[in-house]
Image (tube, rainbow, N blue to C red):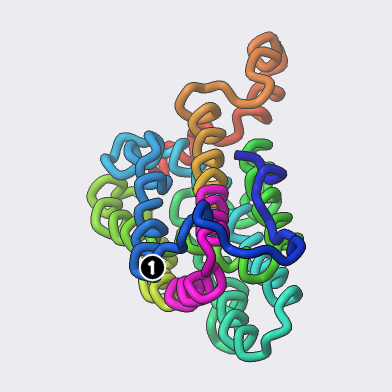
């Protein structure tokens, strides 16, 4: 599914009467069940995540994932700012703005982006190289940008619906907390704080997003549209891991065939920046 294929808000057609052929809307309970069933396509089931969960990822693969997911992390507040910009309901904005504060930080709270940078440092990456986004793969950038652009141009209710992958997020965060200490003991435990924070934040946020979706998408056509929107977000997350899998599991980074012909070792190193250098080898 591409962004252009998504059924965004449609203008109302001329008045017409309901016919026997018009599908009846699902009940609220059945609609929610179908939304939750999309969890079968959540990126926790991607081979890259399965390898990560089972302790089969190399340090370079973990670092690659952390460095690329940073691009997603810094764009989440931008996505949420687009939701706010398109929403004229003050009460909704008062609730939704908490998501931006959670990521960007406020007052004495450092926020999720800072917590992610601490995870990167715990994995042996420097704060500067992660913030520079030098490791972000084109496929990851395209997927994240598509998500932000969707939120920019969709209605705020449609953008809220796309956030419902949070229905499945607590499971993935808990799995990391359960398995990373034993599978990746070289990662400082302080770096796991992001996952601990998101356990409660995701559960809180998804209740609001779910309520918006169930309240707004009430006809059968709208409900099917909501499922398509959620599938689009699932596609974004899965595509990000596809790009990482190509680069860090199959060793097919972008332009890998050109890299293979490069005789300049400095060029080789610049295009393989996450390979374990002697200092990172020692730290691991």
Which residue is located at x 42 percent, y 78 percent? 204
- Which residues make up the magenta segment? 205-232
* Residue 101 point in image, percent of width and height: 59, 79
Which residue is located at x 51 percent, y 49 percent? 231
- Disc 1 is placed on an element classified as loop
Which residue is located at x 55 percent, y 41 percent? 240
Report which quarter residue 260 is drawn in: top right
- Vertical comparison of 54 with 77: above or below: above
- Residue 47 as seen in the image, left or right of residue 159: left
- Residue 130 as seen in the image, left or right of residue 173: right
Report which quarter residue 28 is drawn in: bottom left
- Vertical comparison of 8 with 111: above or below: above
* Residue 78 point in image, percent of width and height: 69, 66
Which residue is located at x 61 percent, y 75 percent? 100
Category of crowding for the residue at label 1, using alpha-carbon neighbours closer than 10 angstroms: few (below 14), some (14–19), many (at least 20): few
Assign the magenta stretch its main secondary structure: helix
- Does the segment drawn in magenta span residue 226? yes
Q: Give the camera-side residue of 102 and 32.
A: 32
**Is residue 263 among what the camera can see?**
yes
Q: Which residue is labeled 1 in the image?
A: 27
């Amino acid at each position: 599914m591409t962004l252009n294929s998504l059924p965004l808000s449609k203008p109302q057609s001329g008045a017409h009467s309901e016919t026997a052929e018009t599908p009846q809307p699902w009940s609220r309970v059945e609609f929610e069940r179908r939304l939750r069933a999309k969890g079968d396509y959540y990126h926790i089931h991607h081979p890259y995540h399965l390898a990560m969960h089972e302790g089969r990822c190399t340090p370079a693969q973990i670092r690659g994932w952390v460095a690329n997911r940073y691009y997603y992390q810094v764009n989440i507040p931008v996505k949420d700012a687009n939701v706010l910009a398109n929403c004229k309901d003050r009460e909704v904005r008062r609730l939704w703005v908490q998501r931006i504060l959670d990521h960007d930080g406020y007052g004495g709270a450092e926020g999720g982006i800072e917590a992610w940078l601490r995870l990167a440092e715990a994995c042996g990456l420097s704060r500067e190289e992660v913030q520079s986004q030098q490791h972000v793969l084109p496929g990851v950038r395209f997927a994240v940008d598509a998500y932000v652009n969707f939120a920019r141009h969709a209605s705020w209710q449609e953008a809220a619906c796309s956030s419902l992958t949070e229905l499945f997020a607590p499971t993935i965060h808990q799995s990391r907390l359960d398995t990373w200490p034993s599978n990746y003991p070289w990662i400082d435990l302080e770096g796991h704080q992001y996952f601990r924070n998101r356990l409660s934040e995701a559960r809180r946020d998804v209740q609001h997003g779910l309520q918006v979706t169930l309240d707004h998408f009430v006809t059968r056509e709208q409900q099917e549209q909501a499922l398509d929107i959620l599938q689009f977000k699932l596609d974004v997350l899965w595509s990000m891991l596809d790009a990482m899998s190509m680069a860090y599991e199959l060793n097919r980074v972008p332009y890998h065939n050109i890299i293979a012909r490069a005789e300049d070792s400095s060029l080789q190193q610049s295009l393989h920046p996450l390979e374990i250098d002697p200092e990172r080898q020692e730290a691991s």
